[in-house]
Image (cartoon, rainbow, N blue to C red):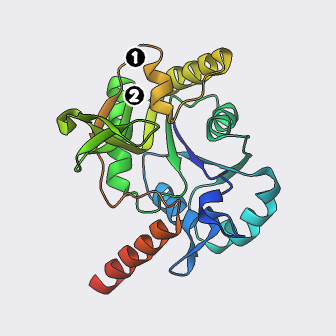
Amino acid sequence: MVSAIIVAAGKGVRMNDTVRKQYLDLAGRPILAYSLMAFDACDKIESIFLVIPEEDLDYCQKNILSLIKLQKKVNLVPGGAQRQDSVYNGLQALDDKTDTVVIHDGVRPFIRSEQLTACIIGAKETGACILGVPAGDTLKRVGKSGIIEKTLVRDAIWLAQTPQAFQYHLIIKAHEKARQDGYSGTDDALLVERLGVSVKMINGSKSNIKITSREDLKLARAMLQEKISAV
């Protein structure tokens, strides 16, 4: 059984808005709605667990889920203090028949069904598989003083995205190990890497942006408008 965890429990501080970033309008729908619809359309996903701030449970039900037509049931899960805590809450809520888990940031609205499918297949074959894109810019490591310390060779550098898919026994072990160690990682793949397990990277898309700032939101609106105009 393949289950999905969509994480949308962030406060959206960088957006500097009274409305949380996952609920902001994007061409007439909340940003989060697009991620939900993409996962709903993926045949390989059997259940969806949406992790949101605990105080937003009623809001999400009334203002998002009731306004979009989904075929799959969306199970609401209260989030934690940090993203990693929220993912762990989602993992704890999954059906015990789950063997593969797909974890996605709710503010990446342009994920495509075929990318989801490829990620799931990769996880079933290798245990862990994530989307990413090769770095296109020159990468510099900069010290606290603002001085460049080193120019990195970008040939082997990729920018990680979500979704990230894992066999359940592997990702729950990784999260429990991190909690035991008091370790906080920047993504779920890093927690799995800490176990000494290899994680496969496959091609994502530059359009699979994460909306965290006003500039990101402007770009997302422009991308969506271009897509609508092309139809």
Disc 1, SS: loop
Residue 231 in view = no
Task: Please provide percent x and percent y for residue 131.
Answer: 35, 43
Task: Please provide percent x and percent y for residue 69.
Answer: 58, 70
20 horizontally vs 166: left or right: right
Q: Amino acid at mark 2?
A: Ala
In primary-sequence order, the first of circles 2 and 1 is 2
Question: Any mark on residue 197, and which?
Answer: 1
Disc 2, SS: strand
Look at 65% across and 52% down and name the residue there: 10
Q: Residues within 10 Å of mark 1 (few under 14, many from 20)?
A: some
Q: CA distance from mark 2 to mark 1?
A: 8 Å
Look at 48% across and 55% down and name the residue there: 39
Look at 67% across and 51% down and name the residue there: 9
User: Quadrant of the rendered structure where residue 89 is?
Assistant: top right
Contact (CB < 8 A) between labels 2 and 1? Answer: yes
On the image, numbered disc 2 is attached to which residue? Answer: 128
Task: Please provide percent x and percent y for residue 212.
Answer: 53, 59
Task: Please provide percent x and percent y for residue 105.
Answer: 52, 50
Image vertical order of residue 93 relative to residue 73, above or below: above
Look at 77% across and 59% down and name the residue there: 56
Image vertical order of residue 224 relative to residue 14, above or below: below
Image vertical order of residue 52 relative to residue 186, above or below: below
Q: Nearer the viewer, residue 154 or 159?
A: 154
Q: Amino acid at mark 1?
A: Val
Q: Nearer the viewer, mark 2 or mark 1?
A: 1
